[in-house]
Image: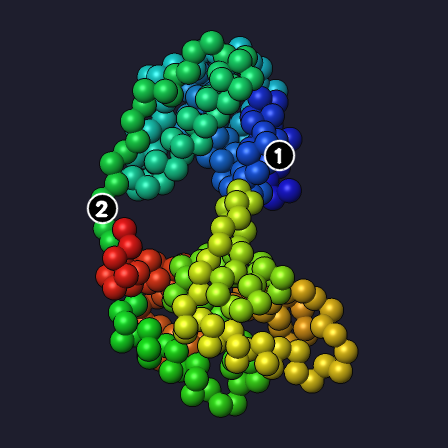
Amino acid sequence: MGFSYEAMPQLARDFATYKLTIQGCSQKTVDEYLSDLRLFIKFIHAKRSGIKIPSEAFDALDISALSLNFFEKIDTNEIYDFFVYLTNERANSASAKARKLSAIKAFFKYACQKRRVLEKNPAVDVEAPKKKQSLPKHLSMQECLLLLDAVESDKESKSRERDYAIITLFLNCGMRLSELVGINLNDVDRELRSLRVVGKGNKERIVYLNDACRDALTRYLKVRGDGLKKPLPTNALFVSKQYKRISNKTVQWLVYKYLERAGLDYKHFSTHKLRHTAATLMYQTGKVD
């Protein structure tokens, strides 16, 4: 596990197990929840104990043995004190504070409604900090064409068809990086009209493919496994040069590579920004909300 559960109180460990096994959250999501909860619990414990924040004593504070009685005494004012600390001492953005509040609310909801070990929920009426509304960055239609042309013109690349198909799917389907990497051959409709992806919380959804995606996948599937005289050892749709499932890092690298070739690297785009691009273009051209 990425986060040391032993450093947390038992109730927080139980909460993490619930998020993982019952709600099906990813390990990364649960680790982020625990990291935020750990800071919150340490802050409350330090304030009650008269320990200076920040200080070496605060950093070394052990919260693993805190009992249920500690959480029963937490009130709404202490939660607001924590957010004053996040603002004044840690200069957290509204987004960062909202994420921490989400973890705190989820934790107390679990303790009150699922486990029923706490009678009152001190976080239930705490409002999330208002975030500045801004549109996500995205590529224009012209920039999308420049990016695809950069892949198409890379004649020396042995994985050109694969990379073209990957970027085409990103730009047209709005899927996440993990969803794309996880696609298997049997997830793809035989007529290349749709494919199945597994998203956050192991939720499955069907992605419908347009002509651009079908054409790119047709070209890629013709050369998938070229040079290998036996069946591929993986069912993954997109494979590496070692004929294994392509990794997240490889996909991120190839996106950065072609953004640079297209002269778009200065905009600091990423695979996630390509997801925003797909959503924006759908809204602008396809009458999708």
Q: Which label number is shown at residue 275?
A: none
Where is residue 277, by image quadrant? bottom left
Furthest residue to the front? 191
User: Closest to the observer: 282 or 68?
Assistant: 282
**Which amino acid, by three-letter code, is at mark 2?**
Gln
What residue is shown at x 47% (from left), y 9% (from top)?
A: 119
**Left or right of 216 on screen, residue 234:** right
Q: Secondary structure at mark 1?
A: helix
What residue is shown at x 49% (from left), y 90% (from top)?
A: 155
Residue beneath disc 1? 21
Task: Judge the density around disc 1: few (<14), some (14-19), many (≥20) Cα neighbours within 10 Å.
Answer: few
User: Closest to the observer: 123 or 25?
Assistant: 25
Q: Nearer the viewer, mark 2 or mark 1?
A: 1
**Left or right of 184 on screen, residue 49:** left
Residue beneath disc 2? 133
Mark 2 or mark 1: whose residue is earlier in sequence: 1
Task: Judge the density around disc 2: few (<14), some (14-19), many (≥20) Cα neighbours within 10 Å.
Answer: few
What residue is shown at x 23% (from left), y 50% (from top)?
A: 134
**Left or right of 44 on screen, residue 126:** left
Where is residue 152, by image quadrant? bottom left
Percent x, y for residue 33? 49, 35
Alpha carbons under labels 2 and 1: distance apart: 34 Å
- Considering only vertical position in the picture, is 128 above or below 254? above
**Which amino acid, by three-letter code, is at mark 1?**
Thr
User: Closest to the observer: 252 or 176?
Assistant: 176
Q: Secondary structure at mark 2?
A: loop
| Screen quadrant of the N terminus | top right
Percent x, y for residue 95? 32, 41
